[in-house]
Each structure stands twice: as C-alpha cells, then as structure tokens.
Amino acid sequence: MNETPPAVRLLIADDNAATRAATAALLETGPSPVCIWHAVDGVSAVQLAEQLQPHVVLLDVQMPRLDGIVAAQQIKQRWPEIRVIVQTMYSRYQEQALAAGADEFLLKGSAPAQLLAAVFPAS
C-alpha cells in the first residue's frame, strides 16, 4: 500500500496578491503535497509562523509594516527549524538576507525549478 507523504506546510509572504497566487500554483506542482497559507506583510508572516509552525516560509523583501529581511531574522531567531527562503527582484539583498538567517535567497526571475528545489530540497 502506498502512503501519501505528509503535506509540506508553506507560508508565502508577499504584498502582491498575483505573485502569491502564482507562487502557490507553482508550489502545488512540486513533488510533495502542500498546505499553503498567505501573508500580506512581514508582521503577518511572523504571526502566522508562530501560529502555524510551517516547514517553509517564503518571504518577499519589500513588504509593508515589516520587510522580509527583518521578518526572516525574527522567524529564524524564534523558530530556527523553519526553513526561510527570501525571494526578491533585487540581487543586492542577498547578503542581508543570508546574514539575517535565511536558508536560501532566490531572485524572482529564477527558473521555477530553482524555487521547487529550494522548497523541496530532499525531493
């Protein structure tokens, strides 16, 4: 009997609804089932990380109320087991994101396979 693997719990934090929807649609094609939540800003991302304890948090850098770099730092300090991926249009944020504790940094123009590999590294 084949058992379905447990769902990967994902939190996508981006202030752009179209970007959140497109990212979720891509991640649903990944190698494992997913359960996806959405946040519209960094404050919501940190709050939802606490409430939901996702396996992976995907953060945009430029968000209202709290940017993705600070959100990444807060999430990694409180819950180091959560995999944090910072994704943005601008490569200049890479050093800051990694210094804040992000596990991965991706450009939004990256190939879909790169995002899938970052979210599902063991697959």
Image (cartoon, rainbow, N blue to C red):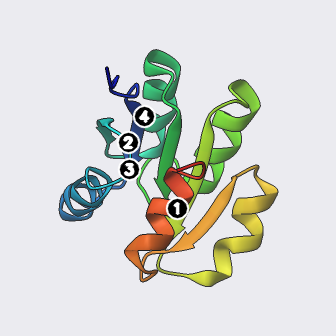
| Sequence-first disc among 2 and 1 | 2
Q: Residues within 10 Å of mark 4 (few under 14, many from 20)?
A: some
The residue pinned by badge 1 equals 117
At mark 2, the secondary structure is loop
Query: Tag 2: residue type?
Result: Ser
Q: Residue drawn 76% across and 49% down?
A: 101
| Sequence-first disc among 4 and 2 | 4
| Sequence-first disc among 1 and 3 | 3
Query: Tag 3: residue type?
Result: Pro
Query: Tag 4: residue type?
Result: Val
**Residue 79 position in % (x across, y down):** 68, 26
Q: Which mark is residue 81?
A: none
The CA distance from mark 1 to mark 3 is 10 Å
Position of 27 with respect to 71 (left or right) is left
The CA distance from mark 3 to mark 2 is 4 Å
Position of 17 with respect to 60 (left or right) is left
**Residue 41 position in % (x across, y down):** 39, 46
Q: Which mark is residue 32?
A: 2
Mark 3 touches mark 2? (CB < 8 Å)? yes
**Residue 27 position in % (x across, y down):** 32, 54
